Image (cartoon, grey):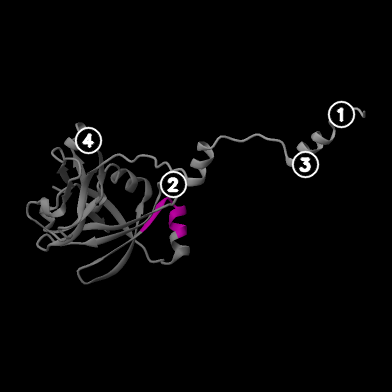
Amino acid sequence: MAQIVELTAEPRSGTGKGAARQIRFGSRVPAVIYGHGRGTQSLTLDAFALSQALKDVEWASALIQLTIGGKTVRALIREIQRHPVRPDILHLDFYEIRADERVRLKLPVHLVGTPEGVRNQGGVLDQVAREIEIEVLPEHIPDRLDVDVTNLTMGHSLHVRDITIANAQILTSGDLTIATIVAPRTEEVAAPTAEAVAEVAEPELIRKPREEAEGEEGEAEAPPKG
């Protein structure tokens, strides 16, 4: 089952970058909620309470019990904007859902186990896909998708078509690779060029320049005259 997170929000009237900046200065986070024919409604949430509530939570698949002005609705978090350097949450998008209507969401993929190709064949596990999209009723939203890779061997891959999720329809293409076992990468060494090989194979010939040799011959002592 999906994790259930309880949050409290307050309606807000100001919009735009300036208003959002003032909200953040007041230790609150701007947000919006939309869906099911309601116009987009602007909200604010307490920054500290929000951070604590979402700590260690798979927010993409979490079921949010969102209280707005005393009324509680169910929602999913569609997007979280974070500060590029700090972990601060800058903005959230909520999508209101109904208990009897199927929703689409992206489910995090977690690999479980140590593959055979890693244990006994010297391979490396490469996770290609980290989430898949599903359609499901809210009551059947899984917390996350655990995929067992224990039997995966060298050169083989696990695809979306190899898994099933109870009470959910998988929308991601079945051909998408989830994980594969590959050979460890080795540093490539460039092959020596023909010139380099020739330089090594041929010993250096040490001899005097022609001019120097001729000079030495000219300096030899002349034979005595008879």
Disc nearer the start of the sequence (3/4)? 4
Mark 1 neighbour density, 10 Å: few (under 14) some (14–19) many (20 or more): few
Residue 100 in percent (x, y) is at 9, 62
Indicate which disc, 2 or 3, sits on the residue closer to the N terminus: 2
Q: Amino acid at mark 3?
A: Glu
Question: Residue 221, which numbered label?
Answer: 1
- Residue that appears at 71% across and 36% down: 208
Residue 207 locus on image (x, y percent): 68, 35
Nearest the viewer among 191 and 57 is 191
> Cβ–Cβ below 8 Å for labels 3 and 1?
no
What x and y, as percent, mark residue 14? 41, 66
Real-space Cα separation, disc 4 to disc 1, in angstroms: 82 Å
Q: Secondary structure at mark 1?
A: loop
Q: Dot 3 corresponds to which residue? A: 211
Across and down, in percent, residue 50 comes to: 32, 48
How crowded pointer 2 is (Cα within 10 Å; few <14, some 14-19, many 20+) is rated as few
Q: Residues within 10 Å of mark 4 (few under 14, many from 20)?
A: some
Q: CA distance from mark 3 to mark 4?
A: 69 Å
Point out which mark residue 114 bears: none
Q: Secondary structure at mark 4?
A: helix
| Mark sitting on residue 86 | 2
User: Which amino acid type is marked by label 2?
Assistant: Arg
- Label 2 residue SS: loop
Question: Closer to the observer: label 3 or label 4?
Answer: 3
Pointer 4 residue: 118
Q: What segment is highlighted magenta in the picture?
A: 21-30
> Which-is-in-front pick, marks 2 and 4?
4
| Whether label 2 touches label 3, CB < 8 Å | no
